[in-house]
Amino acid sequence: MGKPSYPTREGLWAKGKRDEKSYKKVRLGMPYAEAVSQFRQAILGRDDFDPAALFVWGTMQATAVLNILKAVERAFGKEGQETVRKAINEAGYEAMHELLDNSEVSEELDEMERVSYLITALNTILYASLERPKITSPDSCEFDILWCPHQDRYTAFDCRVQRYFVEGMLDALSDHGYGDFTARVETLIPKGAEFCHFVVEKLKDHAGKNPWHKYSDELGERALKKREKQG
């Protein structure tokens, strides 16, 4: 597997436009609207603002979240892990819920078009990532993450903490009428891949837990077992 190569003209950032004609019927908004507006005003016309400084600050926060999860797992085991997981779920839910409230997605679009476009919002806005999306069928879509804020700091196993944010985001999507799908990861940059590859598809079993959440459970158990071995 190759490593990511930059600069690249592939994919799109938050202000990018997808190739599909139907994407014109979508307006993606931002969560934390008032705070975002204040930030934009604060940097307006300033030549001394470096976006990399904001990235450094965000990376420090992401490192803190991961460290908190690991520390609580060591101190309190599964109960602590679930407490942190719930708190992260709530943060992901809030961000996605506000994004959805501030977005417009035409009901004329097919369901998977709407889902794929909202996943683009999740990736490019909530995760500030460079996405290469594709709708593959009426029941599925895929995307590559060509650059992610965590790729050069997290190990592949560390990425499990981000699954908890996504759990909350999926719950928010479900509450807005998009609960009939799940996602899975096929490749990860921290594991040596050229890009992270995800598949989003309609749920085949509506009776049990969403497979995304279920695999998060498995990773959580693995983390606790690692802690036990380390003593």
Image (cartoon, grey):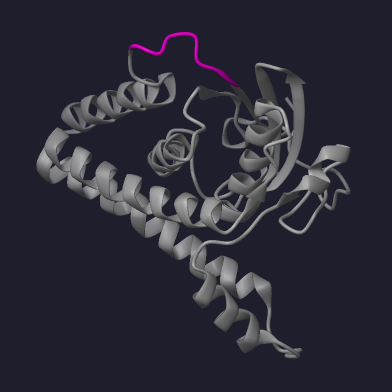
Q: Is residue 186 left or right of residue 156?
A: right
Which residue is at the far front?
108
Q: Quadrant of residue 110?
A: top right
Q: Is residue 191 left or right of residue 19?
A: left
22 in magenta = no
Q: Residue at x 82, y 48 (%)?
A: 24
Q: Residue 227: x percent and y percent?
A: 21, 33
Q: Is residue 226 above or below residue 85?
A: above
Residue 86: % across, % down: 26, 44
Secondary structure predominantly adopted by residues drawn in magenta: loop
Q: Position of residue 35 (x, y in %)?
A: 50, 76
Residue at the (50%, 23%) spot, across then down: 180
Residue at image coords 82%, 43%: 18
Q: Which region shows up in magenta?
A: 201-207
Residue displayed at 54% across by 51% down: 100
- The quarter of the picture where the C terminus appears is top left
The answer to whether 20 appears left or right of 179 in the picture is: right
